[in-house]
């Protein structure tokens, strides 16, 4: 590890400037600070230095607010695990990560948890902004308290989040349509299936549908796109009835992990000739890919959203490291041929 003097020589600044950057003190221009931080990082100096000076550092609290999970197959289980793993990585640097969970189908649950966070006044907040209007309202309170925050999974425009980590949902939907176009001809129809209670809140799902439709329309093919909103009480009956009544539907697109439920219905009703595309890998969806019910899964390394989110906030608080405005998660395609490489 290089000394402060050596770091100063590389950066062409004084040792005092390097010391002020290391300890996050004032009187250093932002340009110089970022230059020195980059050199420190390149020389693996930052983390070792921080660990040795923890006693002098301010303790920081990061709050995380994401949907609760019921099973390990739920999408939010992986971001949750990412947050837990990130805490293990930053706790030795004086950080506490307080985890808050809400029911993604209950706006009041989101409001109550956000109220608790605002009362606690943490140093930074990671948010899954499922409910747009309430998120917009509450982040104003965070901004008033000068509490930085970032979004994961859903990117809401026009707010003051320091960063976003997640998939470009519109392009994710376009990818689904491109894959679907491998199966369908001009005379065929496709069906978009979504859960009714998610429609008004989940912007990522909305954007995926727009990307899917936009891509197919640009193909100039004569393809009819049907949409089906499913209620919890009658989902199987309506879906199977729709597919049997419209035999020209050869492909079903599910813009969420709800693809697992649809796959179950297709399998139980011997409708295995329907081409099915959905999102997010878990134990249940992996099984459906392996048995050929789901043709393509689109995934986005959701574990990294939670992990990277906490790490970015930690670097922002401790090192004054300004993050990129957007960190796009990959749009990965999983098939029967490569599923084992993702589940090992």
Image (cartoon, helix red, strand yellow):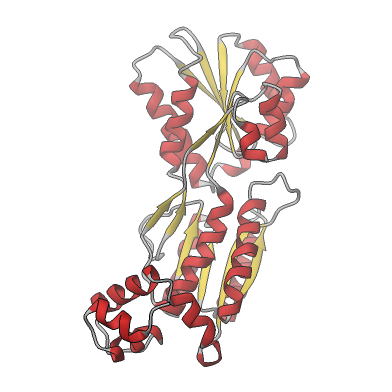
- Residue extending farthest to the left is 12
Q: Residue at x 61, y 76 (%)?
A: 91
Residue 256 on image: x %, y %: 58, 38
Q: Residue at x 72, y 36 (%)?
A: 284
Q: Quadrant of residue 227?
A: top right
Q: Nearer the viewer, residue 312 or 112?
A: 312
Is 328 above or below relative to 158? above
Can residue 119 be seen here? The reply is no
Q: Quadrant of residue 234?
A: top right
Residue 291 on image: x %, y %: 71, 23
Q: Residue at x 62, y 16 (%)?
A: 274
Residue 218 on image: x %, y %: 33, 22
Q: Nearer the viewer, residue 341 or 283?
A: 341
Residue 220 on image: x %, y %: 34, 16
The quarter of the image holding the N terminus is bottom left
The quarter of the image holding the C terminus is top right
Is 241 above or below relative to 119? above
Number of residue marks: 0
Can residue 127 be seen here? The reply is yes
74 relative to 185 in the view: left or right: right
- Residue extending farthest to the right is 268
Is 311 above or below relative to 268? below
109 relative to 135 in the view: left or right: right
Q: Residue at x 21, y 80 (%)?
A: 12
């Amino acid at each position: 590890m290089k000394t402060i003097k050596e770091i100063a020589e590389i950066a062409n600044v004084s040792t005092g400037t390097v010391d002020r950057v290391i300890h996050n003190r004032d009187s250093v221009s932002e340009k110089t600070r970022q230059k020195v931080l980059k050199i420190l990082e390149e020389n693996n100096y930052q983390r070792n230095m921080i660990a040795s000076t923890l006693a002098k550092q301010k303790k920081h609290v990061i709050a995380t607010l994401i949907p609760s999970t019921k099973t390990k197959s739920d999408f939010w289980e992986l971001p949750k695990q990412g947050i837990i793993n990130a805490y293990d990585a930053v706790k030795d640097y004086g950080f506490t990560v307080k985890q808050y969970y809400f029911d993604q189908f209950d706006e009041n649950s989101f409001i109550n948890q956000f109220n608790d966070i605002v009362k606690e006044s943490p140093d930074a907040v990671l948010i899954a902004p499922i409910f747009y209007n309430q998120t917009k309202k509450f982040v104003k309170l965070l901004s008033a308290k000068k509490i930085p925050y970032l979004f994961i999974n859903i990117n809401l425009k026009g707010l003051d989040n320091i960063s976003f980590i997640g998939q470009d949902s519109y392009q994710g939907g376009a990818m689904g349509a491109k894959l679907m176009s491998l199966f369908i001809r001009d005379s065929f129809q496709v069906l978009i299936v979504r859960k009714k209670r998610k429609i008004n809140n989940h912007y990522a799902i909305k954007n995926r549908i727009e990307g899917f439709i936009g891509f197919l329309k640009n193909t100039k093919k004569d393809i009819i796109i049907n949409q089906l909103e499913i209620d919890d009480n009658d989902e199987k009956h309506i879906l199977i009835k729709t597919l049997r009544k419209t035999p020209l539907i050869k492909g079903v697109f599910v813009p969420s992990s709800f693809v697992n439920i649809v796959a179950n219905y297709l399998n139980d009703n011997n409708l295995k000739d329907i081409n099915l595309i959905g999102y997010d890998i878990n134990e249940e969806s992996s099984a459906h890919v392996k048995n050929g019910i789901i043709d393509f899964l689109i995934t986005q390394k959701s574990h990294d959203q939670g992990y990277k989110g906490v790490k970015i906030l930690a670097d922002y608080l401790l090192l004054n490291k300004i993050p990129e405005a957007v960190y796009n998660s990959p749009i990965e395609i999983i098939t029967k041929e490569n599923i084992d490489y993702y589940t090992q």
